[in-house]
Image (tube, rainbow, N blue to C red):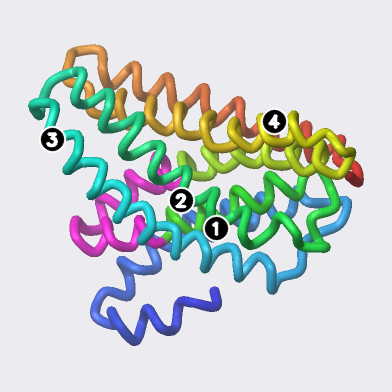
Amino acid sequence: MFFIAPLINLYGGHIILIVAAIVPAFFLLRFIYRQDRLEPEPHSMIKNLVLMGIVSTFIAVMCERLGSIILNLFFKEANTLYNFILYFFVVGLSEEASKYIVLKRTTWNASEFNCKFDGVVYAVTVSLGFALWENIEYVLMYGFSTALIRAVTAVPGHACFGVFMGVWYGLAKRCELRGDASTSRTCRILAIAMPAVIHGCYDFIATMENAASTAIFVGFVAVMFLVCYAVVKKLSANDEYL
């Protein structure tokens, strides 16, 4: 992809790890782009959204650091309440709100945003840009085994969060164009809240420490993947102009 060369120059000695980190996001991005059958988005917009997704990782890091500082002032670490607040409000909300900020700034007034399914394409693309950069950082730190695990969990997980964001984001745009500003505003709120809640559930369950935690996590991820796949296929098949 268009940003691989700079990464190779920067991390030339870790080319295999970088490729392993990028490939899952690339294939998911290709999948979601091919579902946009009514009026595919220009490649320039897709590239820009991937870059904006990378930018959103830096916004999220700043928000998470500030949130963690505040959280530590009032709660002790390593207990259920602390983890709940951390993963739902600090991590989940920070990351999904950061994605949404760059998503709306880049696409809301774009002339290309003229189909219902566009919202899903845009949100998933931003989320995969976020996941791609995050994945590179994790894989360079922890190695190839981490790339394999994240290829079937975290990267598609971010894509799923993007699906939930994109569904409400597309509805918000449709309502706005039809003059229903109040419903549009509600949908934009849900475009942040829904993926933040699901993201929080994902992280919270992943960090549970009991005998059933692995089974619960696998079940949660499987259901999330299946639901998102069904939603994408249905919205793609029933896409229409706004």
Q: Is residue 110 left or right of residue 163?
A: right
Q: Cβ–Cβ below 8 Å for labels 1 and 4?
A: no
* Lower position in the chain sequence, tag 3 or tag 1: 3
Q: Position of residue 169 (x, y in %)?
A: 68, 41
CA gap between label 1 and label 2 equals 7 Å
CA gap between label 4 and label 3 equals 38 Å
Work out whether 12 lies above or below 176: below
Q: Cβ–Cβ below 8 Å for labels 2 and 4?
A: no
Examine the image and state in which quarter residue 54 appears. bottom left
Crowding at label 2, few (<14), some or many (≥20) Cα neighbours within 10 Å? many
* Lower position in the chain sequence, tag 4 or tag 3: 3
The residue identified by callout 1 is 102
Q: Is residue 210 left or right of residue 221?
A: left
Residue type, numbered disc 2:
Ser
The residue identified by callout 3 is 72
Work out whether 73 lies above or below 112: above
State the SS at label 3. helix
* Lower position in the chain sequence, tag 2 or tag 4: 2
Q: Which of the numbered marks, if any, corresponds to residue 98?
A: 2
* Lower position in the chain sequence, tag 1 or tag 4: 1
Q: Position of residue 106 (x, y in %)?
A: 64, 62
CA gap between label 2 and label 3 equals 22 Å
CA gap between label 3 and label 1 equals 28 Å
Crowding at label 3, few (<14), some or many (≥20) Cα neighbours within 10 Å? few
Magenta span of residues:
133-155
State the SS at label 2. helix
- Closer to the camera: disc 2 or disc 4? 2
The residue located at (42%, 42%) in the rendering is 152
- Closer to the camera: disc 1 or disc 4? 1
Q: Which of the numbered marks, if any, corresponds to residue 231?
A: 4
